[in-house]
Image (tube, rainbow, N blue to C red):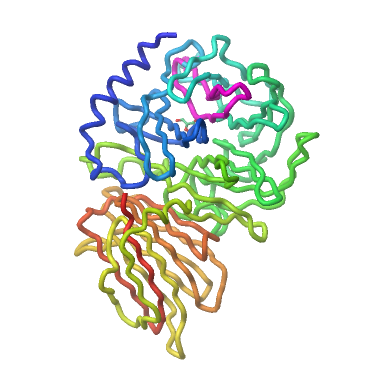
Amino acid sequence: MHSYTLEQARAYESKYAAFISPQERPAYHLTPMVGWMNDPNGFCFYQGQYHLFYQYHPYSNQWGPMHWGHAVSSDLLHWTYLPAALAPDSPADRSGCFSGSAVTLPDGRHLLMYTGVLRTKGPDGLDVDIQNQCLAFGDGRNYEKYSKNPVIDGSTLPAEFSRADFRDPKLWVEPDGSLRCVVANRTSDGSGAILLFSSPDGTAWKLESILDRSYNEYGRMWECPDFFPLDGKYILMVNPQDMSSLGTEFHNGNNTACIVGSYDAQACRFSRESISAVDHGLDFYAAQTTLAPDGRRIMVAWMQNWDALGGQPTDQKWFGQMTLPRELHLKDGRLIQTPVREIEALWGRKVSYSGVRIHEETTLQGVYGRTIDLTVNIRPQGEDSYSLFRIKFALGSQHYTSISYRPQGSEVHLNRDHSGYNRDYNHRRKCQVRNQDGCVKLRILLDRFSAEIFVNDGEQVLSSVLYTPLTADGISFVADGNAIIDVEKYEILL
Ligand code: FRU
């Protein structure tokens, strides 16, 4: 069907994308072609390439009527933009095409499932949303919306479930070719629940079960669910909104939670065994995973915090970026995340040091940069060993961001107070890491406007956006007593 709204978006993005030079964007993280980006959508491998769609408002740097932007990559690091895939242009989604996912159908077609939003005025004059699940079939570039959308209509749900908060379907294909999806909902107790549906072909859907629910324990609405097997267990990933902090694991506001459990596929029942935060940094939300052709489970998320919009420099021409795609594993019941190994193919010049003693602020020749992969192993030394070790990066005369380790209590602290933000948001986070007698390993991936810090080979990750001017590219090491470090730094070259 011809869509003027989509054509207009495609014409707009192809005209204005050229006004953003590659140097104004991160080098290896995906940003919107133009305008605004939020959640990753439809992350998949289709016809020989990774496809990553995203929540997209091309016309401004702010959230607006949601389209789906689209990019492809063969290595998850070099991205090529394709024309916008979906626009809010049909009777089932006229107020927005919200988040969703993609699978390859047994006949080779690409199927997108997304939330169609209809916004109306309630009797009190306030906006009321109706959210339903819709389909679009395509070839990896152009998508035709299903004429009988929506295929899962909130009004068919039992009364306990919301029609206004019913979104973000994550699809998968079962070995027999039938389909399943999980969809987020808010139940009448005001908190999140994840519903599991089944379908023989993608068009007719049946509610099978409630996979898990919050009972007001973990925030309010749960958004953007994902559900997949990993190393002998099942993972339900959810994004609880409006949480109150819980210890050092979950912070106030929106979080991403990894629920580990077991799944009885016959009975469609999931049993929760543990729940933990996926990322302990300042900017991480709405994670989505896919399976790589070689069997790796790969996750990407929106590297942004909904509560900290608008702190970017006024001349930044785009808004929103994805995290680096990460490989997932489970070890001792905990999620382990590592940067996709494809990054190693982009390693340029290496600078390394071993056994360097740090006892005051120190810089090391060749260790600097804003597009780098830096690993630092820190060890205590002697009687006057350190109680605080800090790495400052994106360091200039007025700026730095830092990651610190305190062996006592085994805590890692991220601090972005001096990173170019012009808003008084929270710029600090901390997390508990495994106690290894004063030793810690930090791998820091910098890409101009972000830092992702993998602690102890991915046992914890802290992700954060930064707006520090690019001229601030120094790195220094600070200890309040003796520490010994090994350093390995690679430039990342695209
Ligand atoms: C999460 C979210 C989703 C929704 C989308 C709208 O960030 O609120 O639940 O589909 O953003 O853009």
- In the picture as drawn, the residue positioned furthest to the right comes out as 267
- Residue sitting nearer the eye, 410 or 300: 300
- Residue sitting nearer the eye, 407 or 177: 177
Q: Residue 111, image x and y in percent?
A: 55, 23
Residue 110 falls within the magenta-colored stretch: yes
Q: Residue 207, image x and y in percent?
A: 71, 24
Vertical relation: 187 (above or below) 201: below
Q: Residue 183, image x and y in percent?
A: 61, 30
- In the picture as drawn, the residue positioned furthest to the front comes out as 48
- Which residue is found at the position 35% from the left and 62% from the top? 490
- Residue 240 seen: no
Read off the magenta span: 94-122
Instruction: Report the quarter where the N terminus lies.
Output: top left
Q: Main secondary structure of the magenta part?
A: strand
Residue 21 falls within the magenta-colored stretch: no
- In the picture as drawn, the residue positioned furthest to the bottom comes out as 383
- Residue sitting nearer the eye, 348 or 120: 348
- Which residue is found at the position 34% from the left and 57% from the top? 416
- Which residue is found at the position 57% from the left and 24% from the top? 108
Vertical relation: 470 (above or below) 364: above
